[in-house]
Amino acid sequence: MRGYVKELYDKLSGKYSWEREFLQAVSEVLGSLNPLMEREPRYRKHRVLERLVEPERTIIFRIPWIDDHGGIQVNSGYRVEFNNALGPYKGGMRFHPSVNLSILKFLGFEQIFKNSLTGLSLGGAKGGSDFDPKGKSDNEVMRFCGVLMDELYRHIGPNTDVPAGDIGVGGREIGYLFGRYKKLKNTFEGTLTGKGLGWGGSLIRPEATGYGTVYFASAMLSAHKNSIEGKRVLISGSGNVAQFVAEKILDLGGKPVSFSDSNGSIIDTDGITRAKLSWVMELKNQLRGRISEYSKEFGAKYYEGKRPWGLTEAEIAIPCATQNEIGRDETRALIDNGCICVVEGANMPTEPTAVEMLHDAKVLFGPGKAANAGGVAVSSLEMSQNSMRLSWTREEVDRRLQIIMKDIHTSCLSAARDMGVGDDYVTGANIAGFRKVADAMIDQGVV
């Protein structure tokens, strides 16, 4: 960063010095925008960046609920409505003990550009709570979701803000949240996405983030005269995104070789087959077990307390767990083990210094705001189906998802090359996403 952009960042970092994740996300975006700010001074004239880095609205509230033993528990609830220049706020709800305002501001800020890149009419937002659904009964989760929605319903709606799922918020939680919303508002409308198929959900929505990430990876490799076929793929995480990344990798002829969870990683050099993947899906989705059990079932190597990066040779790495899981040491191990492509299935899983190392080593890098936009893309398709009271086929939704991900790839690559930075997908994604939002903000005046 330099000049005007650096001055802006320094001022913001002084104001929010404790919000580490948020400042990291802002730094990554602003660093890419230097050449655009110099080429098109109108963005500075209209103070677009100053407005863009501040949420339009931040809602913070307490959530008191009663557990199964009659005890009173208290959690914090948040909704950060960052920008609605392109359409209603859109972004997930995360339930996890690590949730705080910094993490949600980082996610909401990223969501602005991610949603812009889809080409759909969506603003950016994020929300959640430090509530941990793990180990809670269905009744406890239902009571918690009900109290959360007692406050949140005032701030959301199909043309205002449309939350979705995220870490800790799956079909069960969306169902409870939607049921309470419907009761409070006395209306059935598409205010949340990720709903059940029988009551307004969309086919392909559970698969969308994972499938979309692989479609983006495939487009990157194709643009560089390569493909996923025959490639070994390291995957972190073992939840929804990781599972469907593995499934689509298998569809395209690749070989997934790893999964992980918060306790450690498994490496299966023979490859995770469809039968093994089905076993993992049952383990994680129904039995809620640990990935270490895979090693006992299939004889694979388990590495306690380790992430999969660099534990075996692989050409492709797809982090699908959480932020900042790939640092300098992991990146060096990936490069040394023959990695040619890293694509982010999670949000900001690669540290800034690691991204620089990948660029220096000529490793293709797909940033999360572009690569994992498939989830929000299909959420928007769910919103469209709800508005029309229609339900599209699996093939139709998947076809639209593939088109969206290919268009995102084209937008990123075109913007990068237009700015003279070659195949820098980070810069391309930031500039392509920013331009659309910034132009809309200028058109709509100072609001």
Image: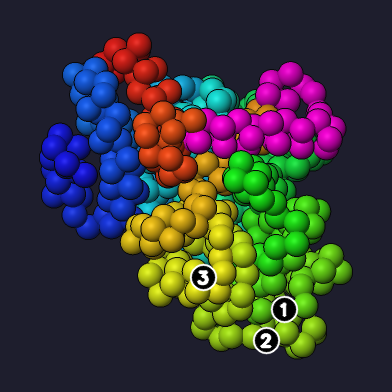
Q: Where is 256 relative to 104, above or below? A: below
- In the rendered image, which quarter contains the N terminus? top left
Find the distance from the CA under tag 2 to the CA under tag 1.
Answer: 9 Å
Q: Quadrant of residue 184?
A: top right
- Residue at the spot x=56%, y=65% of the render? 339
Label 3 Cα crowd, 10 Å radius (few <14 / some 14-19 / many 20+): many
Task: Give 299 or 178, whichever is nearer the viewer.
Answer: 299
At a point 43% along the width and 44% down the height, the residue shown is 424
The residue singled out by tag 2 in the image is 301
Q: Earlier in the sequence, mark 1 or mark 3?
A: 1
Q: Dot 2: few (<14), some (14–19), or many (≥20) neighbours within 10 Å?
A: some
- Tell whether label 1 touches label 2 (CB within 8 Å): yes
Which stretch is magenta?
A: 384-413
User: First in sequence: mark 2 or mark 1?
Assistant: 1
Provide the secondary structure element on which disc 3 rests. helix
Q: Is 271 left or right of 325, judged from the image as shown? A: right
Element type at mark 2: strand
- Identify the residue position indicated by label 3 in the image: 334
Q: Amino acid at mark 1?
A: Thr
Left or right: 95 with respect to 391? left
Residue count near mark 1 (Cα–Cα under 10 Å), binned few <14, some 14–19, many ≥20: some
